[in-house]
Image (tube, rainbow, N blue to C red):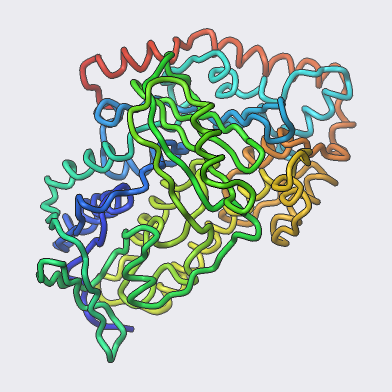
């Protein structure tokens, strides 16, 4: 154990990751245990800033910070998100919806997908999503807050505005912000710990625990400490993206659009007054000029920014915590934003650090456990994203033929085969997305060969009645929800509530 007490935390880099880390550590550790937080960033260094869509877990993070939802939505130009519409993924001109929330009603013996499969055999051919309130609300452009979080939602927001929102939040906890470019990371030759950061101005920033939020550059964890990067390009061949913002031409819908093309996919993320757009592609199968032309041809509305090309490598650091440095965000690893998990990985890394915070010294056992849990989580999400590419009927281009026929991690192959044979999603303890796996498996065209045999113990009329009642319940709740765009306008204009 390193017995050096943690008396000061230094966050290297701003943006979404940096300010989320600073906010959480300052409020939940610094305020109560007198650990000051300093954040170093430079306005000369831009952030990737494409992470404008989230998943519902962000609400948990906001509740930890005590953030007011109305203030957040207003400050970040946010809209509400109920899921993702996947277009051309299973095949050209086919679409399906991955919704938040729980579909149908599972039993003690099996998931709802088994009831749905049995119902199909009985001639009840309603789409799987018809039994999901979030799916139905998204398709009808409806949204509203329900009691007990009865309508699971996330957000679309301006990530730059979010960083500024958190920066202002941090002022009440005396977070020190230092403007400057990091020129050198000073490492102790004996212990291997980081001692300080030297800025281009010559100023030294000393600390006891350093949070690396320097993005893909990974100045601390990668360049200074030499922690290797494990590349996942063999499973996720996309390595480039072009991002651009456009003016809204229609009211915002409560979902993200993910539109597959011949060498990748395009996102559309509707905010209150603008739309975030981007094209993700593989440079092996599509050159930059062709990608730019394809994106421009699929844009609606006036350009508000110039398109930016971004290079990336999917993968992860072999350690996310090394010595007295913890990597958060892109310095830790990168997964393309297909399922809007980037900000979730930031917040889970932060919460994990808070739970293991080394106030009285860094314990190697805690470092090991932190890395083990982080690797488990990101590899689970990695498999979920790979599945979108691999479980497909598309063979219309070299890119899709490669994805369909490539070898995938054993952990993913086991899930695919289990669902194909039994209709079950087998999750290890701590994994997320059980309902999501079911929805995307079915949406991508993977139909189970059988349903759970307990279905045959139920009378056909029981199943028909059960399915009818579930759908009626969704219909009744849906009828109470207002139009999404109207609700956003009313929500942001009304007096600030406690929500």
Residue 386, percent across and down?
65, 50
Whether residue 43 is situated above or below residue 458 in the rendered picture: below
For this rendering, which residue is in front, 112 or 184?
Answer: 184
Quarter location, residue 258:
top right
Q: Nearer the viewer, residue 226 or 65?
A: 226
**On-image quarter of the N terminus:** bottom left
Image quarter where the C terminus lies is: top left
**Residue for point 32% across, 49% down:** 47
Question: 375 left or right of 440?
Answer: left
The residue at the far top in this view is 479
Q: Please, which residue is most extreme toward the front here?
A: 289
Residue 295 on image: x %, y %? 51, 33
Residue positioned 28% across, 91% down in the render: 190
Left or right of 139 in this view: 349: left
Task: Please say if 489 is above or below 1.
Answer: above
Name the one closer to the observer, 65 or 194.
Answer: 194
Find residue 76 and report its horizontal and vertical position in percent.
29, 31
Q: Going 37% across and 47% down the picture, which residue do you hit?
A: 48
Q: Is residue 407 above or below residue 120?
A: below
Which residue is located at x 82 percent, y 30 percent?
117
For the image, the number of numbered tags is 0
Q: In the orientation shown, which residue stands out farthest toward the bottom?
A: 190
Q: Could you say which is closer to the camera, residue 323 or residue 226?
A: 226
């Amino acid at each position: 154990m390193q017995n050096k007490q943690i008396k000061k935390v230094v966050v290297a880099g701003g943006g979404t990751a940096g300010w989320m880390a600073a906010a959480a550590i300052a409020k939940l550790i610094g305020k109560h245990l007198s650990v000051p937080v300093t954040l170093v960033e430079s306005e000369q260094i831009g952030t990737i800033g494409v992470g404008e869509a989230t998943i519902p877990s962000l609400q948990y993070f906001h509740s930890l910070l005590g953030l007011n939802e109305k203030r957040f939505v207003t400050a970040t130009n946010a809209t509400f998100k109920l899921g993702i519409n996947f277009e051309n993924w299973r095949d050209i001109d086919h679409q399906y919806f991955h919704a938040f929330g729980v579909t149908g009603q599972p039993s003690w013996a099996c998931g709802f997908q088994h009831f749905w499969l049995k119902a199909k055999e009985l001639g009840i051919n309603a789409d799987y999503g018809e039994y999901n309130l979030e799916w139905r609300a998204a398709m009808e452009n409806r949204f509203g807050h329900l009691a007990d979080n009865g309508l699971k939602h996330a957000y679309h927001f301006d990530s730059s505005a979010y960083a500024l929102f958190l920066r202002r939040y941090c002022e009440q906890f005396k977070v020190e912000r230092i403007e400057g470019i990091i020129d050198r990371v000073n490492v102790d030759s004996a212990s291997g710990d980081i001692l300080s950061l030297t800025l281009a101005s010559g100023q030294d920033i000393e600390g006891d625990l350093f949070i690396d939020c320097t993005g893909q550059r990974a100045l601390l964890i990668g360049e200074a400490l030499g922690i290797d990067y494990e590349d996942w390009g063999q499973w996720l061949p996309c390595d480039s993206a072009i991002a651009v913002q456009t003016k809204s031409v229609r009211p915002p819908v409560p979902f993200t659009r993910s539109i597959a093309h011949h060498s990748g996919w395009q996102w559309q993320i509707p905010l209150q007054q603008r739309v975030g757009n981007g094209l993700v592609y593989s440079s092996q199968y599509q050159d930059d000029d062709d990608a730019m032309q394809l994106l421009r041809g699929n844009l609606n509305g006036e350009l508000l920014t110039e398109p930016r090309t971004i290079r990336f490598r999917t993968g992860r650091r072999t350690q996310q915590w090394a010595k007295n440095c913890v990597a958060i965000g892109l310095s830790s690893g990168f997964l393309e934003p297909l399922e809007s998990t980037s900000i979730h990985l930031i917040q889970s890394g932060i919460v994990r650090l808070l739970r293991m915070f080394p106030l009285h010294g860094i314990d190697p056992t805690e470092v090991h456990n932190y890395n083990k849990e982080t690797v488990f989580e990101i590899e689970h999400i990695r498999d979920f994203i790979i599945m979108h590419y691999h479980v497909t009927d598309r063979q219309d281009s070299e890119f899709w033929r490669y994805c369909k026929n490539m070898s995938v991690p054993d952990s993913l192959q086991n899930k695919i085969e289990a669902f194909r044979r039994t209709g079950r999603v087998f999750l290890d303890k701590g994994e997320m997305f059980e309902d999501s796996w079911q929805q995307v498996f079915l949406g991508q065209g993977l139909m189970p060969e059988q349903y759970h045999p307990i279905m045959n113990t139920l009378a056909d009329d029981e199943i028909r009645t059960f399915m009818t009642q579930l759908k009626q319940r969704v219909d009744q709740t849906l009828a109470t929800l207002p139009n999404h765009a109207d609700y956003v306008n009313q929500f942001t204009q009304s007096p600030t509530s406690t929500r």
